Each structure stands twice: as structure tokens, then as C-alpha cells.
């Protein structure tokens, strides 16, 4: 991800911003349509470097997902507007929503009528081919997690050319399984790619995908299912997508070409944007003051809100301060000293919104309403004092009455913590300066230590580990965690979960996370969210937009930008 450091779900790591590639030519301004005419849109976009629609470790950047999805349709596409069952985008999906039977264990899926670019029908042979490749080579598949898909499948059956089924080893919440497991399936062209042996075929496809200079010429990539085909590709440079005339989906492209143009960095991109020579780009946060200038040059400014949350991780296993973080009243007091609404408005220039709990606010809903703990320094002070602390404003507060401070907290223990935060983000630095100032008013001393990669230096750890000395960790300058469609917590907040860096553990939280994953109760996710919103496994922080998009005002179909970080270029068109 270059300088954009955050933890992601593994499926939605986007990289449109600080790019690491050489810029293409500027193109000429046009009176009709965009920088390259009325049938083309030019997009600031880091050069994708993985074309095979089976993800590979080290190649999960978001630009690769967008690129691959433009060429190869996924079995299911998703939307978060509440318009359809289990968040399935029925128009863009290749299959009907699953029919569920066998007490929730069997999902039967029927493919719709679609074709490959060469006119051959998309059938269950293409699903079987995908299944054989990923199950035989799952150790090389970036979307594979031991125990997850496909390990959790008891049987996969093809019933006919259009129908197949999965029977799971245990009953899952259908919404969780559809959104977080079936989202990995991409039918691939068996008739064009299959060499008869799954290991040999996978090796050949992987080798071809690791040779970007041949992307535009290799016959393999000519057979696809998406609305676009690859017209030209320059490694580390410009990529051109052309309309696929034989595309069988109903969302047919309205443009002839999409030009994906990389830049060496924010300044290079913004200079070209200011000159009007790019149709869709972004305003770097440092240049947000020039928003009105761009609007005067007929650009529309549109914040891109992600399906994400942002938080400050607490290290419950720190041998010194972990015992403090285990006190619910202290977590509540710390949360009450973070003025999320004001920080979002003033420091993030209204380009962030409060996080209230582990489930993001639905797109379009007012963010920050209903947070369990608002900004309330007086209540925070009262909480500390009633739990045995001597509060020394602008000094050092300490535990005065150990009997009240909580199990394991000795008299004289100071409220003093180090925050390990991301460097390189001005707004983040200003945000922690504000939080440090607020906490100092109650004698809570924060030391802010900025590092390039805060995730790497604040790992999950045991109290006896030398590397367990960190107190708080922040890696959310562009969102801490981006979710697939079903925002469950088994990877974040369950005991010993893979991304539970702070080693939070709560039997009640574990039960609620299990219920969201395995029960048929539609309210399970809400119950999980409500509990963790109050229990504070982490401190909730302002959630910044993914990026501040800027696009020509006569370019239609861009908004709403997909909160799960895909781009549907086929929806875009110029006003006539």
C-alpha cells in the first residue's frame, strides 16, 4: 500500500491516492466530454499489477480488485442500500440469491444467462473450474483463511449447467456466509484456460499474471466476462480499458474507453487536476483549501465514504498498563475525552465522522448519532475520582485508593500512556495534539510517538514478550478496518482473533460474535454492535473518508461512490 497504511479485510485494500508510478501524458482539454473527448474518461489510478481473478498474497491492493472486476464479474456483487436480501446487487450479480435449505446448511445457487466475451455460455463448469483451482492451491490464494472457505464446506455439488450447491459443515448466518464467503467466488473460463490438471493450470495462470508486460497481448486474458476488455497496458504506467461489445450484463458501458493514469505522488496528480487535464482524481488533504478553486473550474467535489471504522487500539497485555485498560470505567473516561464531532469538523475539515461502534453507519445515515459515550470531560473527571484517582489537572493523576482503582492497580500508579501513531498524516498529528491537550486537563499524560508503520511495531503479544511494551496504537488515518458487506467481528474483536492486536477478550463479546456468524437471528449483528459500542474494546475515533474525489461536473454516474471501494466505470457517462 505504499505510504497508505491501514488494516483491511483482505478484499478491499484500495490505493488510488499516493501512487508509486510514473505519470502518463497530460492529454488535451476538450470542450465536449473529458480530457480525451466525449467517449473517454481519464482517471487518476495506480497501475494495477494483478489480472488473474484469484487473489494472490502481496497483490491484494484495491486497484487490482477494481481492475479484475472490470474484466471478470464476480458471482455476487453487493450493495449496502438495504434494497435487497443479504446485500446482493441482483442486477450486477451472475447468479440469483441462494435458496437456503437443510436448516441453513445448504445453499443452492442458480446462474443467470450470461456469456463469455467469445460467446460461450457461463455455466457451472466455470464454477467447478474455479473451485478445483482454489481448493487444490488454497495455500497460494490470498483470500484463504484456515477453517474458512473452502475448509468450512462439507460438499460442493453441480446439479446441472446452471445450478450448484454448497453444504456447510455447520449452519451459518446466511447473511454472513453470502457476504463474507461467497464474495470470493469468480467464475473463470474453463473452456479457455483449463489444462486438465489443477496444479499445472494454476501455475501457468499465476506465471502469466506475474508478467504484466504481456497483459494486453496474452490470449489468456482475451476471454473475460466483464463490461471492459484490456486495450493497452504499460507496466507502472497507463492502462486503457475499452468497452466490451459482447458484454452480456444489463449494466452495459456507456463510454468507449477508460484511461487509468498513475502519478508519482499527490503533488503531480493535483497539478494535473488543477489544469483540468484529468476527469476523475482526488484532492490530497493538504490541498483541501483549494476545493473552491476546483469547483470554479467545473469539478464536483465528492467525499468517498468507506464501509469502515476507525479506532485506537489498547494493549490489554501490556505488563504495566494492561491492567488499567481492563478497567471499564477508565476506558469510558478516556473515550469521553475524545471530542469526535469537533475533531471531525475542524481537524478533518468535515471529511471524517465519529465512529460509535464496530458496525459502520449505513451509507447516507447521519454518522455519530447515538454514540454511547459523548465528549464529556466533567463526567470523565467524576468517573476517575469516584474510582479512587487523585485527579491533578495539567499534572500527573495517580491512583490514590487502590481498593477503588480496580484489581491489580497499585496505589501511586500514574495515568501515563504512549500512543504509537502513523507518521505522514498532518490531520492525524493535529488530532492527537488535541486529544493530548484534553487528557492533560485531567492529569492523563500522553506521549505521541509517530512511526511509518504503526501496525508492524504494535503486534499482538503476550505480557512476557519484549515487544509487548506498547500502550496504544493508531493506524486509522484512512480508516482502521474496511469490511466486506457483513460487518462481523470474528477477525477483529473475538478472543485471539487474527487482527485483535490489543488482545481484547470478553466471553460475552465472543458469544455475540458467534451469534452474528452462526445464528439465523437477524438482530444478532445489532446486539453485537450495541454491546461493543459500550464495552469499548478499543477507543472509537473519527473515521476519515477514503479520499476526497474530484471529477468533472458533467461526468454522470460516479456518485454514490461504492463504500466497499469498487468502481463501476460502466455506470459513467458524459452529459450530452
Image (cartoon, rainbow, N blue to C red):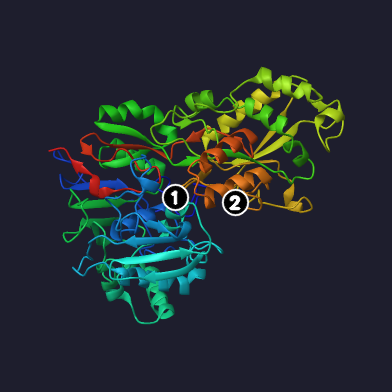
Q: Is residue 184 above or below residue 355?
A: below
Q: Which one is nearer the viewer's eye here, 242 or 22?
A: 242
The picture quadrant where one finds residue 83 is: top left
Can I make out residue 558 in this image? yes
Which tag, 2 or 1, sits closer to the chain's start? 1
Q: Is residue 336 left or right of residue 221?
A: right
Residue receiving disc 1 = 175
Q: Residue furthest front?
A: 102
Circle 1 packing at 10 Å, graded few (<14), some (14-19), many (20+), is many
Query: Is 526 positioned to the left or the right of 206 in the image?
Result: right
Tell me where residue 485 appears, x and y as whole percent. 43, 47
- Residue 488: % across, % down: 52, 47
Residue 560 versus residue 459 in the image, above or below: above
Could you tell me which secondary element the residue under label 2 belongs to?
loop
Which image quadrant: the C terminus? top left
Real-space CA distance between mark 2 and mark 1, rounded to the nearest whole angstrom: 22 Å
Foreground mark, 2 or 1, reads 1
In the rendering, which numbered label is found on residue 198? none
Q: Position of residue 25 (x, y in %)?
A: 27, 50
Mark 2 residue crowding within 10 angstroms, few (<14) / some (14–19) / many (20+):
many
Q: Residue furthest top?
A: 378
For the point 64% across and 40% down, the residue is 537
Residue 214 appearing in the image: no
Total tally of numbered discs in the picture? 2
Q: Are marks 2 and 1 in contact (CB under 8 Å)?
A: no
Q: Which SS class for mark 1?
A: helix
Residue lying at 26% horizontally and 70% vertically, measured from the top left = 217
Q: In x, y percent, where is residue 560?
A: 32, 38
User: In this rendering, is residue 309 above or below 160?
Assistant: above
Dot 2 corresponds to which residue? 499
Q: Residue furthest bottom?
A: 196
Amino acid at each position: 500500500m505504499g505510504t497508505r497504511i491501514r488494516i483491511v479485510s483482505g478484499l478491499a485494500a484500495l490505493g488510488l491516492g499516493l501512487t508509486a508510478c510514473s505519470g502518463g501524458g497530460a492529454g488535451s482539454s476538450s470542450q465536449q466530454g473529458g480530457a480525451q473527448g466525449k467517449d473517454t474518461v481519464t482517471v487518476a489510478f495506480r497501475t494495477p499489477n494483478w489480472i488473474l481473478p484469484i487473489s494472490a498474497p502481496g497483490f491484494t491492493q484495491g486497484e487490482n480488485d477494481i481492475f479484475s472486476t472490470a474484466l471478470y464479474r464476480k458471482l455476487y456483487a453487493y450493495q449496502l442500500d438495504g434494497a435487497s436480501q443479504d446485500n446482493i446487487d441482483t442486477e450486477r450479480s451472475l447468479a440469483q440469491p441462494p435458496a437456503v435449505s437443510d436448516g441453513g446448511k445448504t445453499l443452492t445457487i442458480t446462474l443467470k444467462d450470461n456469456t463469455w466475451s467469445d460467446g460461450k455460455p457461463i455455466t457451472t463448469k466455470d464454477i467447478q473450474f474455479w473451485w478445483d483451482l482454489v481448493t487444490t492451491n488454497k495455500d497460494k490464494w490470498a483470500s484463504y483463511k484456515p477453517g474458512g472457505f473452502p475448509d468450512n464446506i462439507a460438499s460442493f455439488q453441480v446439479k446441472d449447467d446452471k445450478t450448484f450447491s454448497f453444504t456447510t459443515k455447520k449452519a451459518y448466518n446466511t447473511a454472513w456466509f453470502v457476504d463474507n464467503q461467497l464474495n470470493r467466488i469468480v467464475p473463470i473460463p474453463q473452456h479457455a484456460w483449463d489444462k486438465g490438471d489443477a496444479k499445472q493450470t494454476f501455475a501457468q495462470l499465476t506465471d502469466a499474471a506475474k508478467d504484466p508486460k504481456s497483459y494486453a497481448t496474452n490470449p489468456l486474458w482475451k476471454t473475460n466476462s466483464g463490461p471492459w476488455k484490456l486495450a493497452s497496458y504499460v507496466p507502472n504506467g497507463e492502462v486503457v480499458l475499452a468497452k466490451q461489445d459482447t458484454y452480456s450484463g444489463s449494466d452495459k458501458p456507456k463510454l468507449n474507453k477508460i484511461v487509468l493514469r498513475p502519478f508519482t505522488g499527490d503533488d503531480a496528480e493535483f497539478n494535473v487536476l488543477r489544469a483540468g487535464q484529468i476527469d476523475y482524481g482526488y484532492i490530497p488533504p493538504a490541498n483541501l483549501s483549494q476545493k473552491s478553486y476546483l469547483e470554479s473550474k467545473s469539478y464536483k467535489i465528492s467525499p468517498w465514504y468507506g464501509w469502515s471504522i476507525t479506532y485506537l487500539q489498547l494493549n490489554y497485555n501490556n505488563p504495566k498498563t494492561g491492567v488499567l485498560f481492563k478497567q471499564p470505567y477508565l476506558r469510558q473516561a478516556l473515550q469521553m475525552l475524545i471530542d469526535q464531532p469537533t475533531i471531525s469538523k475542524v481537524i478533518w475539515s468535515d471529511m471524517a465522522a465519529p465512529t460509535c461502534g464496530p458496525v459502520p453507519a449505513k451509507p447516507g445515515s447521519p454518522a455519530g448519532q447515538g454514540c454511547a459515550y459523548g465528549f464529556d470531560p466533567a463526567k470523565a473527571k467524576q468517573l476517575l475520582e469516584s474510582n479512587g484517582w487523585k485527579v491533578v489537572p495539567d499534572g500527573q493523576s495517580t491512583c490514590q485508593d487502590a481498593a477503588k482503582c480496580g484489581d491489580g492497580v497499585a496505589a501511586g500508579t500514574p495515568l501515563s500512556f504512549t500512543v504509537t501513531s502513523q507518521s505522514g498524516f498532518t490531520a492525524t498529528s493535529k488530532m492527537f495534539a488535541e486529544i493530548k491537550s484534553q487528557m492533560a486537563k485531567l492529569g492523563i499524560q500522553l506521549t505521541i510517538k509517530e512511526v511509518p508503520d504503526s501496525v508492524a511495531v504494535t503486534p499482538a503479544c503476550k505480557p512476557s514478550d519484549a515487544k509487548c511494551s506498547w500502550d496504544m496504537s493508531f493506524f486509522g488515518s484512512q480508516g482502521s478496518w474496511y469490511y466486506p458487506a457483513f460487518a462481523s467481528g470474528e477477525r477483529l474483536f473475538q478472543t485471539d482473533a487474527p487482527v485483535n492486536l490489543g488482545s481484547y477478550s470478553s466471553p460475552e463479546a465472543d458469544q455475540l460474535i458467534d451469534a452474528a456468524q452462526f445464528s439465523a437471528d437477524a438482530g444478532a449483528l445489532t446486539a453485537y454492535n450495541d454491546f461493543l459500542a459500550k464495552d469499548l474494546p478499543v477507543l472509537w475515533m473519527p473515521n476519515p473518508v477514503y479520499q476526497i474525489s474530484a471529477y468533472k461536473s458533467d461526468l454522470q454516474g460516479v456518485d454514490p461512490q461504492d463504500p466497499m471501494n469498487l468502481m463501476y466505470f460502466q455506470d459513467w457517462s458524459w452529459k450530452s
